[in-house]
Image (cartoon, rainbow, N blue to C red):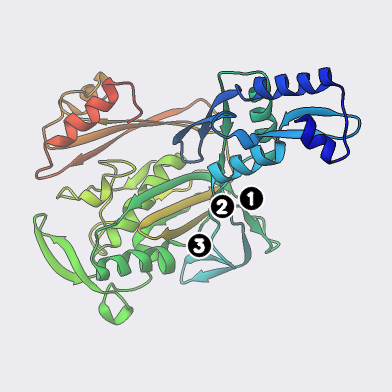
Amino acid sequence: LGNRLSKRGISHKKDKLQRAVETRQSLLKKKTMVQITRGDGEIDLWNISTSGSPLLVKPVFSKEEATFIIDKERVSTMIQDRIGELVTPVDARITATEDHNGLLRVVTDIVAKEGDVFDKDAALETVMQSLRDSKEETSIVVQRVPGKLINETGEDLGELTLLGTGRSNFKGSTWSRSQNVRKALDAHVNNVLVAPDAVFSFNQTLEGAVTTRNGWYMAKIIENGVDLVEAPGGGICQASTTTFRAMTNSGFIPIDRKAHSLYVSYYEAHGVGIDATIFPGSQDLTFENDTKNYLVVQSYYDGYDAVVNIYGTNDKRKIELSGPFFSDNAPDSITKEHGELASNEIAWLHAVEYPNGERKENIILSRYRTMPRYLSQKYTMHASAGEES
């Protein structure tokens, strides 16, 4: 070390160089376990150590100084690489409102979408301090934030904060079914405006007959409660199911809702048993906007993920959703109201507590002709292990 410094014209006393070597040896023993909580709730455990990445220990030599430090820039790069590319939240602007024969809609430039953010400077300082102090573990949190709806119309539409989100996945759908799901989300559910005290009707959002002439493709639907047949619009219920989940998570209790008669595997993710079938002229999905302000429903798809968001003015209502419950784990709150669940039924308990203290409880009950036997075991095992259902 002394010879290398001499060649660079830098000279230090032997004891100072010895301390620098000791500092380097000490720094090469630093390590910490970083727990990264991602925006979707997934946990990533990252073991970072200077012995495993020796270039993290950086020499600092000048005519006045001879030492080693942990390279802050390298740590910052490692954090960024580990976190990976984040999706930036997307904000949307409302430029106008329209009346489509009684169906109100907003006009927006794009659809608001959630994204992930994290404080880079705070994350860097957290990891640096943990390495310096040889702290066994530390954490970084990536926050998932919703896209904003910005009202530029001049009309009073309320605050338009995100009240709730519904999700579903339609991977495995045929091309025609996928096209119908995307059309329902893009051209029909998206940008519906619901006035205070008005009733949202899913069927009204379709704005016309579900026919091939109106752009719907032939895909399988459930007919007579048991038969799978090709018909225009097969897959629209993916959109109604996703909308129902958004309603539930926003604190709205449906006026009209019916589960599918056959168990549909597409609806297991994000809420098994929380589905809603519709059929224009006979079955609708409806709820009343019992807030004192407007609601805006936005929807979109990302690949095969369907998303419905409901924006409005938060009146501080509290929402509780517990489940899924089956015949072997249904609580008294359900059996007293409904009776014992049958082997082909799934139930959830949905409760809404309003700012005035009023509380409404709604049992979301889905009864199928048959359903896979593994479902009950799969979800009751999760519950018994203390996992969120």
Q: Disc 3 or disc 2, which is closer to the eye?
A: 3
Task: Kindly identify which numbered label has been placed on residue 191.
Answer: 3
Q: Which of the two discs, 3 and 1, sits closer to the camera?
A: 3
Question: Which disc, if any, is residue 294?
Answer: 2
- Picture disc at residue 264: none
269 or 79, which is in the foreground? 79
Going from N to C along the chain, the mark reached first, 3 or 1, is 1
Q: Position of residue 6 (x, y in %)?
A: 84, 35
Where disc 3 sits, the SS reads loop
Q: Specify the amino acid type for callout 3.
A: Asn
Residue 20 image position (x, y, % from top left): 76, 23
Pick whichever, 359 or 87, lies toward us. Answer: 87
- The reply to whether the C-beta atoms of the residues labelled 3 and 1 are less than 8 Å apart is no
Considering only order in the chain, which callout, 2 or 3, is on the residue closer to the N terminus?
3
Please tell me which residue is depicted at 71% across the width and 36% down the height of the picture. 72
The label on residue 158 is: 1
Looking at the image, is 169 positioned above or below residue 102? above
Q: Position of residue 181 (x, y in %)?
A: 33, 64
Q: Residue at x 57, y 24 (%)?
A: 31
Q: Residues within 10 Å of mark 1 (few under 14, many from 20)?
A: some
Disc 3 versus disc 1: distance between alpha carbons?
A: 15 Å
Secondary structure of the residue carrying numbered label 2 = loop
Residue 281, above or below 310: below
Crowd tier of the residue under label 2, counting other residues whose Cα lies within 10 Å: few below 14, some 14–19, many 20 or above = many
- Furthest residue toward bottom: 213
- Whether label 1 touches label 2, CB < 8 Å: yes
- Where 299 sits versus 175, above or below? above
Image coordinates of residue 85 in percent, x first then y, are: 55, 51
Q: Amino acid at mark 2?
A: Tyr
Write down the quadrant of residue 157 in the picture. bottom right
Residue lying at 78% horizontally and 27% vertically, measured from the top left:
67
